[in-house]
Amino acid sequence: MSMEPQLVKSAERTVRILEALAESHNSLTLSELQQRTGFPRSSLHALMRTLVELNWVETDSGRSAFGIGPHALLTGTAYLDKDPALPFAQETLEDLRDEIGQTVHFARRDGGHVLYLATRESREAAHVIPRVGRRLPAHVTALGQALLAQLTDDEVVAILPEPLVGLTEHSITDLTKLTGELDQVRTRGWACEREQGTPGVACVAVTVDYRIPATDAISCSMPAGLAPAAVERITEAVIKHTRKLAATLRREGIR
């Protein structure tokens, strides 16, 4: 008999529904939710009614489409509020952005994804894409590659989806190529990707080494056509500020 803990079906389904709604840029109909989750329509209907009543899900007057509700935001904000590393990371992002003038991020690995916890936008950014609370596949971001490089190749394979999904034509979707890239990250101590996650954007990232293996990283997004000398200057700044943050977190006893 298996000793693995069994998931409570209704609780698991509730979480999967919320994740499906959170990942969608648009409201979803009951049919679309059923297609994405595979849950029976009868149980899905009952769960949606409950989630709407509790303000975890919003719907229109005819209950024809559903989206994430305000109480989900309250819970997400509570996660950020309780994180002792975040105030220090935000201060670091401010200093880093002021020095290099580019958009900078602080993110945490969530399985095979990275979750953005803080961002400071370039003051010259014409089109701002909100990132806090967003989740992207780790293998297509410099943040994710820096954090995946902290793991063994077997650990990386175990957490990444099969097949690897690409976001652009430059995304790494071959596992052998990815593990080769992670070897380079381990050798040089920082990750760099060009247009793998977003067309026209390059990114460098460094892990915040206050935990072993590191769970967090800081990155800088910049135009993909930036001169090599400018990229080198930015990389050195990201390394300097990230190491300073890690030392501060260790000194503060934050783990």
Image (cartoon, rainbow, N blue to C red):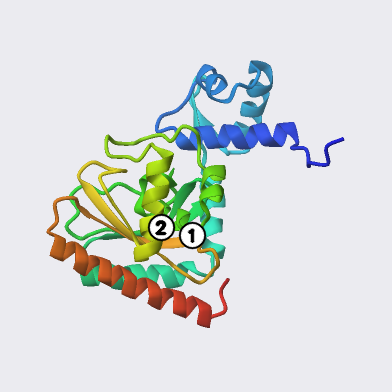
Q: Quadrant of residue 186?
A: bottom left
Q: Quadrant of the N terminus?
A: top right
Residue at 47% of width from left, 46% of height from top?
113
| Residue depicted at x 14% and y 65% | 229
Q: Position of residue 101 (x, y in %)?
A: 20, 65
Q: Position of residue 105 (x, y in %)?
A: 35, 59
- Of residues 91 and 188, the one nearer the viewer is 188
- Residue found at x 14% / y 56%: 226
The quarter in which the C terminus is drawn is bottom right
**In the image: residue 160, left or right of residue 172:** right
Residue 94 has which mark? Answer: none
- Relative to 239, does residue 115 appear above or below in the rendering? above
Q: Nearer the viewer, residue 206 or 103?
A: 206
Please give the label number shown on residue 146.
2
Q: Amino acid at mark 2?
A: Ala
Q: Position of residue 31 (x, y in %)?
A: 53, 16
Q: Which residue is mark 1?
A: 150
Q: Is residue 200 visible?
A: yes
Label 1–label 2 contact, CB within 8 A: yes
